[in-house]
Image (tube, rainbow, N blue to C red):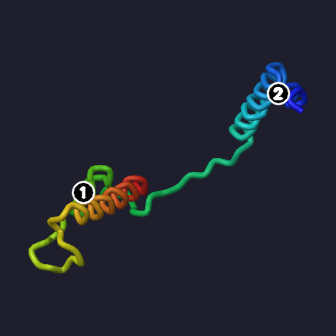
Amino acid sequence: MKERIKGAFTKRKILHFLKMALFVVALSLILLSLLGTVAHATGLVDDTINAENLYSKYPLSNYQLDFYVDNSWSWLPWNWLDGIGKSVQYGLYCITNFVWTISL
């Protein structure tokens, strides 16, 4: 049984398998790059620059979302001064800002 397993996994067979796998991956990438359809996407917000409107005076790439939470009154369901509240809110901010940046 051990000889049968050793015979199935020789260095020559493993190298042959790796070469064939590399060839198939390379061929697939080449064919996809030559024959694949390219998709172009537009942002979620129109990037028109118009000096007449103050909100579109500068391009959207000039802006970034703000991170501010008003904790002057107890509207949050947890104590904002503890560490987990800030971490959760900042994590949500990072995700939102990432989506905003991608949509530009």
Residue 12 sits in which quadrant? top right
Residue at x 30%, y 63% (from the top left corner): 88
Q: Secondary structure at mark 1?
A: loop
Q: Position of residue 48 (x, y in %)?
A: 36, 58
In this picture, is 25 found above or below 84? above
- Nearer the observer, 78 or 9: 9
Q: Is residue 85 left or right of residue 30?
A: left
Residue at x 24%, y 78% (from the top left corner): 77
Q: Secondary structure at mark 2?
A: loop
Q: Position of residue 67 (x, y in %)?
A: 22, 60
- Nearer the observer, 51 or 4: 4
The residue type indicated by label 2 comes to Phe
Residue at x 33%, y 63% (from the top left corner): 92
Q: Are marks 2 and 1 in contact (CB under 8 Å)?
A: no
Q: Answer with mark 2 or mark 1, whichever residue precedes in sequence.
A: 2
In this picture, is 36 found above or below 53? above
Please tell me whether mark 2 or mark 1 is closer to you in this view.
2
How far is disc 2 from disc 1 in space, using C-alphas? 66 Å
Residue 51 sits in which quadrant? bottom left
Name of the residue lying farthest toward the left? 72
Residue 14 sits in which quadrant? top right
The residue type indicated by label 1 comes to Lys
In this picture, is 71 found above or below 16? below
> Mark 1 — residue?
57
- Nearer the observer, 44 or 20: 20
Q: Which mark is residue 9?
A: 2
